Image: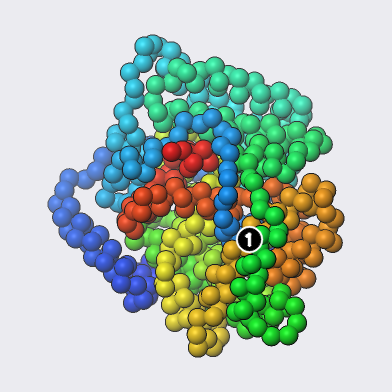
Amino acid sequence: MTRWQRTITMSLMAGVTLAGCYSLDPEMKRIVEQRKTQQRGTDHAPPPAASPAEPDASPPPALTTKAAKDIPAIDVRRLEVVSGASAMPAPDSMPAAPASGLADTTGAGAWPAPAETADPAAALFAAQTIDAAATAYVLLSLEIGTHEKGYIDAYYGPPSLLDAAIKAPRDKAALLAAARQLTAKLDGVVPDLADPIEKRRAAFLLAQLRAAETRLMMMDGTRFPFAEEAERLFGVRPELKPLASYDAQLAAIDALVPGPGDLATRVEAYLDRFTIPKERLQKVFDAAIARCRGRTATHVAMPQEESFKLQFVTGKSWSGYNYYQGGYHSIIQVNTDLPIRLSRALDLGCHEGYPGHHLLNMKLEEQLVKGRGWKEFSVYPLYSPQSLIAEGTANYGIDLAFPDRTRPDTERDVLMPLAEITPPADDRYWQLTDAMKALQGARLTIAQQYLDGQIDRPAAVALTQKYLLFSPQRAEQSVAFTDQYRSYVINYGIGEEMVRAFIERGNPDRDEIWRRMALILGEPTLPADLLAP
């Protein structure tokens, strides 16, 4: 059963949120003072030019049925780029961001000026073809969504396209043929595109169409090996480590939680001490999300009208979820089937909210759908390269918002008192949660073996207990997620490591790190862009 919780209006809460965060964080005090100084210097400047008119000022309710997003990071070993996209500029060559901390995606200066073309007429025709293909892609995606519940993650585009898709959807064979025809049409005009951002737009559409083709084939019974499925859907071919490679990390964790009995049982018993009582969940999550937002808002400007609603639900295979509704509004759900530990509050607050899914979707709507009029970003097919970017930035956003000691300080000084949990006398709790993140690659290896038929379901559950140190109940939930979403599991850890490697290339300072994050959020970014030299 789901139930609506009170609406949290972020524009009203921001002042209280920021004040509460700054007392803990000297870095945030410095940033705010810098912002105030910049603002004082521009108080008498002429007003900025009006933003482009919104193409669809009253978006319909979102069509949102999607998968969870809450798996911690893993190490990336070797990745093969599988989309032939034109890549993002390397971080060292990226243009400077405007004073707001946002990448400029609606005016000059965001990307290199358009290259001279030998045939301006061909370039214009190519750009018009991309516009037409974008509308066809949206309709195609919505029609595929009528054949598979959960395929469409969010939609807030023209109601007419949604109505058309629902009233007269083509069959899967016709949709498969249409996806291939659209791909051929785009391939034919890409060489004539002159503007680098238009080339990246076309590359994005081509990658999304390849994923749509693959998913349609899967709906019709085709099965691909795990690595190939992941490559075709999400744009990266994972190469996974054998389970035995995680044994050394298990031994290190064993030293942190000594005692009789098997390791998973000891770890579960220790972490259960930090369970949030159900009656305290609302207060703890309100405070956690407020701090996630406050720390994000010091670096990234957000629409004044943005908001979300928090709900607690049951009966899910995931622990947290963001349903983006359009109009800068989300519903964030937290699954209470299993006891919720304290670490999940900041994890989910950042991942589902700020600077995670809620922020990403707002930036896509603000900068690409409304700012550029690109309809294709008003629809989000779950099984596509878009998900690797979404999950990767959301997981990376946890450490981005709470670096170094700021996370344990916030949990100890703010969240534990609200949860009525006695703070530990030492750092073993945080040492353990950090150490367990290094095991997350094992989940992918287990999923690969299970989905490729190398092990059966009971074996997958048993290996999940052993290598992720889960209770039987949590292991069952983990495997149920794999049953439902298959190779989608690669997007969390692999996506996070790709985002981290791209953003932290060259050891940038904190302001530059946030600027690069904003660049990923507000551009048509593909996995290949993150791996480009």
Q: In the image, what residue type sits under mark 1?
A: Gln
Residue 220 versus residue 471 in the image, above or below:
above
Residue 245 to residue 193: above or below: below
**Number of residues whose C-alpha sits closer than 10 Å to that of mark 1, classed few (under 14), some (14–19) or many (20 or more):** some
Location of residue 520 in the rendering, given as x and y in whole percent from the top left corner: 44, 45
Q: Is residue 511 left or right of residue 218?
A: left
Counting every numbered tag in the picture gives 1
Q: Which residue is more in the foreground, 287 or 72? A: 72
Image x and y of residue 187, in percent = 55, 20
Which of the colour schemes (rainbow, by chain, secondary structure, one colour) is used?
rainbow
Residue at (21% x, 45% y) in the render? 47
Q: Is residue 236 left or right of residue 32?
A: right
**Picture quarter containing residue 87?**
top left
Which quarter of the rendered picture does the C terminus lie within? top left
Residue sitting at 46 percent across and 63 percent down?
399
- From the viewer's perspective, tell me whether residue 380 is left or right of residue 315: left
Tell me which residue sits at (66%, 36%) in the image: 232
The answer to which image quadrant residue 428 occupies is bottom right
Residue 296: image quadrant is: bottom left
Q: Position of residue 170 (x, y in %)?
A: 73, 28
Q: Secondary structure at mark 1?
A: loop
- Whole-percent x and y of residue 90? 39, 40
Whether residue 211 is visible to the viewer of this picture, yes or no, is yes
Residue 373 lies, with reference to residue 246, above or below; the image says above
Q: Which residue is mark 1?
A: 440
| Picture residue at 49% right of the left edge, 71% below the top | 288
> Image quadrant for the N terminus?
bottom right
Residue 64 can be seen in this image: no
